[in-house]
Image (cartoon, grey):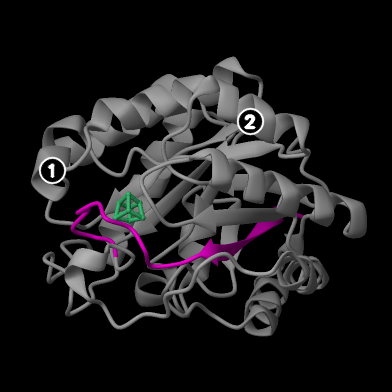
Amino acid sequence: MKQIFLCAINNILSGTCLEDCKFCTQSVRYHADIERYNYKKIEQIVQEAKIAKNNGALGYCLVTAGKGLNDKKVDFVARAAKAIKKEVEGLNLIACNGTANKEQLTYLKEHGLDSYNHNLETSERYYAEICSTHPWSERYETCENVKSVGLALCSGGIFGMGEEKADRNALLASIASLSPESTPLNFYHPNPALPIKTRNIEIDEAASIIKQARILLGEEKLLMVAGGRELLFTGKEQLMFESGANAMVIGNYLTTEGIEASRDKKMLDTLGYKVATSCDTH
Ligand code: SF4
């Protein structure tokens, strides 16, 4: 029976970013109607990790808004990770805190982080159209830093932001060149406050991106359908798994409501998939 890996996200610092990524509601520039808050309490993060674990999550991702890590943020994420590891068994802990250098990443690793997520977002060519405040090369470099300190790399991108097919191919090739342990594929979820108003992707194209990613990344890797799943694949989840996805995000996304975990579990059951209980994909 095919196993599906579940991953949950916790936005532990929300909506306070000064960068101008046109797809992101957490940029303060676009005044999107989202909840914005400073650092969550560590006890709350631990409680939420317990809930995610009970919902079947194996991966648990600690996300902070903002371009990258600084001393305060790295210390906070490390403390949160240490507290979770102490109280919740069996979670693969991922940090997603923007650009990071080797020293910061080593510190996180020493405090219990297993993996670091940093997405390339789109092709190098199209990136200039969606962000002017930091370059794509910095994103790629952070991914290389992750690998060089021995953390597992989680890296993917967003499709449907107005890019061309050649950009999608280029993004997938760039992701594959990093050989990440896991890859989240997001499908753009339009928000009226954001400069990118529409989504130029439909379910068939999304399925072929999943297929292409599976071929490029290899059978052993985690290939996750993340944001936008609820827009494209609700009621047609079989297609994403048949196309090669073996992981998905459960619960809410960073600022967008997802699907209730119990509904997802029922869906997996109905389709005959098992919720994975170990991160070993072999
Ligand atoms: S740097 Fe990250 S949090 Fe900030 S606007 Fe870009 S994607 Fe959003």
In contact (CB < 8 Å): disc 1 and disc 2: no
Q: Specify the quadrant of the image occupied by residue 80.
A: bottom right
**Image coords of residue 147 (percent x, y):** 56, 21
Name the secondary structure under disc 1.
loop
Q: Which residue is mark 2?
A: 152
Amino acid type of the residue tagged 2 in the rendering: Ala
Depth check, front residue: 114 or 3: 114
Residue at left offset 36%, top offset 64%? 16
Q: Which residues are magenta?
A: 1-24
Secondary structure beneath label 2: strand
Q: Which mark is residue 37?
A: none
Quarter of the image with the N terminus is: bottom right
Where's residue 38, x and y in %?
A: 50, 68
- Residue 150 sits above or below residue 187 on the image: above
Mark 1, residue position: 132
Name the kind of residue labelled 1 in the image: Ser
Please tell me how crowded label 1 is: few (under 14), some (14-19), or many (20+) other residues with Cα within 10 Å: few
Q: Taking the image as drawn, is residue 222 in sight?
A: no
Mark found first going from the N terminus, 1 or 2: 1
Whether 8 is among the magenta residues is: yes
Q: Is residue 150 visible?
A: yes
